[in-house]
Image (spheres, grey):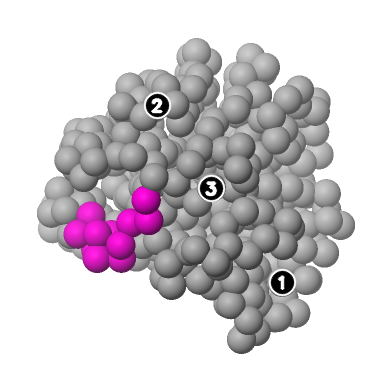
Amino acid sequence: MSDELLEIGGSPAMGRVRRNRPPWLRVRLSSDPEVARTRALMRRLELNTVCEEAACPNLGECWAKRHATVMILGSVCTRACAFCNVATGTPDPVDPDEPARLAAAVAELGLQHVVVTSVDRDDLADGGAGQFVGCIEALRDRAPETTIEVLTPDFRRKDGAGLRVAAAAPDVYNHNLETVPRLYRRIRPGASYRASLELLREVKAATPGVFTKSGIMVGLGEEAEEVFALMDDLRAVDCDFLTIGQYLQPTPRHAAIERYVEPAEFDAYAEAAGERGFLLVSASPLTRSSYHAGEDFSRLQAARAERLTRA
């Protein structure tokens, strides 16, 4: 790892260093050659990653470990959420060879756990559910020992799409609420808090053996009591795992940061979530949905084994 410190904010590709970030939002730039190798592999197999498209602050750490979150169904989203750095516009046609390329990358990286996400594809009749299924099937065939986590859109108004993905039996089904319901109109236009909760409920009810997971950002103007209420809503639909991280403004045109949440507040959120019965909670300034997902899944498996032993 390099000794150079980068204060998080803005896309890494922009080379922007923000001096007003608190010290807990500083990460070390990685000089590990595995970062370049992971990037080269993604380029060679023509795969997109949310790590790059969403300007994730943990890219260097994760890619040094050869962990990358692949973003399927192209790099252009049909929605324009106020927090997201992914491009909005008219998406490319669905690539039928993408699942095979994804499986080849996972096999070459030797991943024990893979996270597969996507842009929103409201233009597709199934919202892209079929491509998720194809990726799961290709991964099971090419890398059968790899555990699979999907991070899907809400598939709003695409009846049965989420259940189709769940039926393909990923190990973890993740769908992020992103923020508290009061802020949806400003932060997540085009989405519905209740529809997202219903998706998580349906997935758990239909496939109880699949772990469900959701995540939110804080620092957007939410109140602590709203976060606690959101936790209660997630537990009411039997969601297993929760991630909470600091929102970071990708560019000046995105939603502003209302405040930087202190590490102690994240600890308090983690404690509250644990008291509510989440099997696992990851809450810290740099937490993201797929950050340390492989390690977390190993812990999830241990938790499931313990739960079965008690039953």
Count of numbered circles on the image: 3
Nearest-to-viewer mark from 1 and 2: 2
* Mark 3 closeness class: few <14, some 14–19, many ≥20 residues within 10 Å: many
| Magenta: main secondary structure | helix
The residue under label 1 is 35
The residue under label 2 is 184
- Can you tell which quarter of the image residue 263 is in? bottom left
Instruction: Look at the numbered disc 1 and give the secondary structure of its residue.
Output: helix
Viewer-side residue, 162 vs 33 = 33
The residue under label 3 is 249
Q: Earlier in the sequence, mark 3 or mark 1?
A: 1
Instruction: Look at the numbered disc 3 and give the secondary structure of its residue.
Output: loop
Left or right: 269 as drawn, with respect to 311: right
1 and 2 marks in contact (CB < 8 Å): no
In this rendering, does residue 168 appear at all? no
- Can you tell which quarter of the image residue 176 is in? top left
Q: Earlier in the sequence, mark 1 or mark 2?
A: 1
- Can you tell which quarter of the image residue 121 is in? top right
Left or right: 265 as drawn, with respect to 29: left
In this rendering, does residue 120 appear at all? yes
Circle 2: residue type: Tyr
The N terminus sits in image quarter: bottom right
Percent x, y for residue 64?
Answer: 64, 74
Q: Is residue 263 magenta?
A: yes
Percent x, y for residue 24?
Answer: 41, 70
Circle 1: residue type: Val
Nearest-to-viewer mark from 3 and 1: 3
Q: Is residue 42 magenta?
A: no
Q: Which residues are the magenta region? A: 259-269
Left or right: 209 as drawn, with respect to 3: left
Q: Earlier in the sequence, mark 2 or mark 3?
A: 2
Circle 3: residue type: Gln
